[in-house]
Structure formats: structure tokens, C-alpha cells
Image (spheres, rainbow, N blue to C red):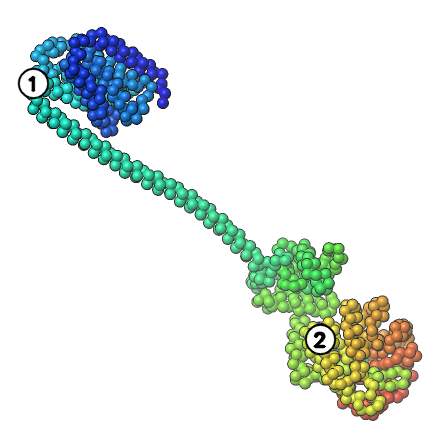
Amino acid sequence: MALDPQEKLSRIITIAFGFLAVIYAVVNFDVSNLTPLLGALLLFAVVIAPRASIPLPGTDIALTFSDACVYLAFLFYGGPTAILFAGIETTANCLYLHYRQGFKFQQFMVPFNIALNVVSFTAAYLIWTTLPTTRLVTATVGSAQHLIVTLGTISVLHFVIASSILSFIRAKNRLSEAYRNWLRDFSSRAMMHIVGAGLAALVYMLAIYGDILTAAISAVGIAIVYFSYRRSVSDLKRAMRETEAVQEEKAETERTLRKEAEVYAEELAVALESQERANLALRKSEQDFQHAALHDALTGLANRKLLHDKLLARIAKYRNDNSSVYHVLFLDLSRFKNINDSLGHTIGDKVLSIAARRFLRLVTPSDTVARLGGDEFAIILKGPSTASKAKKVAQRIHDSISQPFSLSGNRISISVNIGIAPADLEYTMPEEILRDADIAMNYAKAQRESVAVFTRDLRTRFLERVRLEMDLSHAIERGELSMSYQPLVRIADGKLLGFEALLRWNHSEYGNISPARFIPIAEDSGLIIPITKWILRETTDQMAEWRKISPETRDILVSVNISGKHLSSEDLVYDIEHALERSKLAPEGLKLEITESTAMDNPEFTLKLLKDLKRLGVQLSLDDFGTGYSSLSILHKLPFDTIKIDRSFVSGVGPNGEDSEILQTIISLAKNLRMKVIAEGIETSAQLSVLKHLGCDYGQGYLLAKPMTAAKAEAALYDGRSWLPYQTADNGTSTSPAEIDRNDISIF
Ligand code: C2E
Ligand code: MG
Ligand code: MG
């Protein structure tokens, strides 16, 4: 470390004074002093004294024999020799410290130390010579008084001057600081000089008065004191080193602990942060979970659970306060299944989302729109005050949904049937009002209306229907089903073509129920398939039997109605094959009637299926022709053997044959397609005459024969009767009673 200029200057000045002091000593040196003793003392001061120094622990001061050598030189040879001794012994000490102990001296430090010792001793000496006590030196040399005064004065002056200069320079010339430094080092430095002076006095006394023995004893004593002191100093140093080591260890432990604490604190902060993040994520996932639990994933609308909760609240509110009116709408998308089947589920999903958005646009934020599942939705309308106002809202929703739109290049048109259930005090649970809205929706669907409002009468009918469905599922095993047979007659000669098999249900409680009522229930519930299998078994067995009655009955056939549901099931071909095999009926003895609307629902599929059926050898008849919007381009491809003209075209023909144009058109169309024609619902002779005149092949109707039990039909077969009326009245009414076994319950 470089010295600051001020300290540097102070040192140079001291060195300069030291130089002057050495010149002074050299000039005043008495050459007669150069004796072997002086040489021995010099040797001791240069070689032994630096090695025998004892550093004082906790200070930068060492006790040496060097000062003792200087004071001895002074006592034996006077001031100038002692001044030179001071310079030499300091030089020797510095060199020893530097080369042996590895001590690094600062700039000017060695000459400064030498100069300081030389200057301070010179000053002490010069002051001593001016003091009145100098007279005492001339007193008996070696007397105790002489020694105490001389050495005391010299050593005190030497010590005071040396320590003052050093403190002053170290304190950078600041007096107060210098004083504090001086006080701090006072005791140790004073000790250094006192020990030096004491040793010098002791050696001097021995040299003057002592004999060899006393000198030896003293030397041993000094050696013992010296070594025990040195030892205690080294013990002290060791103790200090140990204390320092303990303290260092303690400090190290504290540092380690602090570091660990810091690391722990950091880890804690990281852990807290990640904990916080986890909490946030948990809260978010809880919210997401809650939202997912209450909303439909596809449309984002409320789900069944949320609808249930909201409805529960609405119901409770209305029960408390009649003025808080509400309406529940049940919505069912029509034709949605077709979209899903033909365009795929992705488009189907998009259609549902579009429908959901349209619903939301047409209601207020206080209303609730929910998806119940599939293509079913529900809306809680807060208000309106009356059912007719709710109906207007529903109508608007219907009109909006019915607007066609484009999706992935497809023009899509859907519609919706909506049932409305107004608030009622009888409702206590959401399921009740939803059930009634659903009933109204089903009614709207059955009536081909867009919107219907729930009434209790609808519920009665609905419950009846549910009851019928349940009863129908047990009707076969309970023996309540039977077949009725209605003759199909060749118009030209009254020859029997065969029978149409018509299902009858004699309900244990309600009696005969019209097919028009229970067939749709059977179709909706899927019961029509097992029932038709039963019918196929019954009728093929029956026909196989009847064909054996006579040669005239050998070629008759039975015509069985096949519903759309069964047509689209994969089992139909197998079921028919199985029935034919079982009964051993020739395939051409069985005809299948498929209504025009069913056949045209999916013409591609129908074509494939009909071909499969044709391969079995059975005959095919297109039922209720004229009601199903056939496309001629498709019709001519379908392998039907006969067309059955719907009853409505026949019944429209008046007593004098008016309104027969359509019949004429249909008959010529069938002929062009090379199909036979059967006219249904012939009730009057006029109708029969017209049909005969138009060249219609076959007829069926009350005029010819009502549907009859198997027993009656069998009896008629044995009779071999002609099926044309015996006479045809001019007024166009039949002589045979046209009792219609209709016991229609209004359809739902
Ligand atoms: P459909 O297949 O067109 O059957 C002819 C219907 O016309 C029968 O009614 C028959 O009784 C009735 N009918 C025949 N001649 C006359 C007439 O001169 N005047 C009037 N007013 N009606 C006449 P039904 O037996 O009530 O059957 C109604 C419909 O129910 C059938 O129409 C058919 O679609 C369906 N159906 C009847 N039985 C079955 C069956 O076993 N399976 C299937 N899938 N449907 C059946
Ligand atoms: Mg039929
Ligand atoms: Mg028909």
C-alpha cells in the first residue's frame, strides 16, 4: 500500500534527522571504545538479540534484548556509541524480520525505523546531557543511584520521544489522534524500554561487581525468566490462536447458518410462490369444473343440472308470489337426425351451436336457455304474462330457427317443435313442468304444428298413450293381437287375388283399438318390429294353409304391411326369409306393402332393399300411392309389382263418376311403369264402375268386403264365392253394408 504524501514526508524528515544523528555519533565516536567487549556486545545485538525477541500478543511490539544492548553500550561506552548501536541493532532486527520471518516492510519503513530509534535515542541522550542529573553520571559509576537515574532518565526520554514521534506520524499529524494512539501503546512500549533498561542495569551491575558464580546464577535466572516468559507468551499466543479459531469457527458456523437460512428463505419463497400458483390453478380449475358441471360443453348453454336449479328457484318464487309468472319451453329440432346421418357429426355439432346462438338472440338475459341433450333444448322465459304472449316468443324462435343457412358448403334447413308449459301452482318439482312442456312439444310434432301450449287434456292423452305403449308390449303374450283379412279382388271378374293382412288389437280394458292409434305408438316405440315378425309368422302360416283349400286358392297371396322402422332395420330380409322357410309358403304367395312416404324417405336405401327382397321372390306393393310425393325418376327404378291408389283418390269420385281424372292419371302411369294397380277404399258401385272403366286391375274396399277374421275368410274361401257385389245400384251405393269397424280414439 502506497503511503500518503504527508506520512511519506514525515518519514523522510525523520530519516533525515536520523542521518544527522548518525553523523553526530560518528563525529563524536571515541575510537578507544573499539574493544573486543564492544565487538562481543555488537555481535550479540546483531545475531542473538533479534532471534531472542518475544512479540507481545495483541500488539505490533516485541520485547528484545536490543534495547538492553543499546543501554549497555551507553553505560559502557557513552552516548555516541549507543546512538550507533541503536542504528545497528534496529537494522539487524529489520533484516531478521524481513529475511527470516518474511515480514514485508512498507516504503521507507526500514530506514524510518532505524532513524526513529537513532533520533529518539540521540534526543534522549542530548536532553540527558543538558539535565542537571548528568552530574550524577560522574558520580560513582555503577552505583545503584547512578544506574537508576541514568538509565531511568535515558529510557523514559527514549521511550517518550520515540513513541510520540511514531504516534504523531501514524495519526497523520493530528494531535488528539496521536494522543489516543500513544495512550493505547503506552504500557507495552513502556514495558519494552523498562525491560531493556532493567536488563542493561542487571548486566552492568554483574559486570562491575559480580563474580563468575553470581554472573552464572544471574544468567541462569535471566534465562529461566526469559524462557518461562517466552513460554507463557507462546501459551498465551496459542490460547489466543485457539480463541481466534473458536471465534472463526463460530463465525463460520454463523455464516453457514446465515447462508442456510438465506437458502431456506429462498426455497421457502419459491415454495410459497409455487404453492400460490398451485392455489390459483386449483381455484381456476375449480371454477372451470363448476362451469363444466353446470354447462353444456358443445353449446356453452346451461345443462340439465343448472336448468333444474333455476327451475326449482322459479317454482318456489311463483308459489310465494303468483305475479312472478314464467313459462317453460321444450324445443326439439326436427330433421336433426338426418343432418347427423347424412353430413356427419361435426356438421351436426355446428348446427346445434348455431341453433343455440339463435335461441340466445331471441330471449332476454334474465331468461335461461339450456340444452337437455341431443337435439332437445329448454328455455325458461321469465314472464311473459300470458301463454299467448309466450307462444309469440316461441313462434319467433321457430321462425328464426327455420331460416336456412350455409355450413361448409351445405345448405342446411332445420326446424323445431316447441311445447310451452305455463307456470302453475301444481308444480313443485322441475321435472313436472318439463314433462308437461315435453308433452306439448310432442303434441305439436304429432299435429305438425310449430308450437303447442300444454293443457291438462293433453296430459291425459299422453298418459293414455304411455299406458297403451306399455300394454302393447305385452299384447302378443296376452293374446290380444289378431289378424284381420280384407280381400283384394280382380275388378274384371271378381276373382280373389288374396288378402291384405290388417292387425287388430283387442285391448282387455279398452276393447278394439284402431290401428291408426296404436300403429304409430308401435312404430315410435320400436315394438312394430317384434309385432311384424309375429304377423309374418301368422300370415305366412295362414296363407300356406289356405292355399291348400282348393285349386282356386292355390295362387292367392297375403299382403303384409311393413313399417318404415322395420324397413330400415337390417333384420327385415332375414325375418321374411325365415317366415317363408318356416311356413313353406311359396315366396310369390307373400306381398309386402310399403307406403309411398316410407319408400321415398331414402330412395337409394329403399332401392337396394327392395332388390334384396325381390331376390327372395316376394311381391312388392307401393301403398297409399299419391300421398308421398314420389319422384317419377325414382319410381320407375323401384321394383314394385303393384301400386295401391290411396283411398282419398277413390273416395273423391262422386256418384256420377265425377273427379276421376286423378285416378285415370295414376292408372295410366302405373301401366306405363308396367305395374298392376290396386284401388283402395272402394265403397260405392259408382267408384267400382269408374275404376273398372279406367282399367284398374284390382280393388279393395268395403263395397267388396270388409276386413274379416281369419275364420270368416277361411269360410269364404271354402265357399269359393265371387267378391264383386251382387248388384250395383244406380244411385252408386252398395247393397252390402259398409260397416266400418272404426273405433278410432283421436290420435295424439
Ligand atoms: P292401409 O295399409 O292403407 O290399410 C287399408 C286401410 O283401409 C285399413 O284400415 C282398412 O280397414 C281400410 N279400408 C279398407 N277398405 C276401406 C273402405 O272402403 N273404406 C274405408 N274407410 N277404409 C277402408 P285399418 O285396418 O284401420 O288400417 C289402417 C292403417 O294401419 C293401414 O293402412 C296400415 O297403414 C296400418 N296397418 C294396419 N295393419 C297393419 C299392420 O299389420 N302392420 C302395419 N305396419 N301397419 C298396419
Ligand atoms: Mg296397406
Ligand atoms: Mg293403404
Q: Residue at x 71, y 67 (%)?
A: 444
Q: Position of residue 389 (x, y in %)?
A: 69, 60
Q: Position of residue 521 (x, y in %)?
A: 70, 75
Where does label 2 land, which residue? 571
In which quadrant will I find the N terminus?
Answer: top left
Q: Secondary structure at mark 2?
A: loop
For discs 2 and 1, the disc positioned in front in the rendered view:
1
Q: Is residue 271 left or right of residue 300?
A: left
Residue type, label 2 = Asp
Where does label 1 land, which residue? 209
Q: Position of residue 127 (x, y in %)?
A: 19, 11
Query: Counting other residues with Cα less than 10 Å from the Cα at mark 2, is it few (<14), some (14-19), or many (20 or more)?
Result: few
Residue 743 shows in this picture: no
Closer-to-camera residue (537/467): 537
In which quadrant will I find the C terminus?
Answer: bottom right
Q: Residue at x 65, y 67 (%)?
A: 438
Can you say whether 390 is above or below 186 in the image? below
Q: Residue at x 84, y 77 (%)?
A: 642
Q: Residue at x 79, y 81 (%)?
A: 587
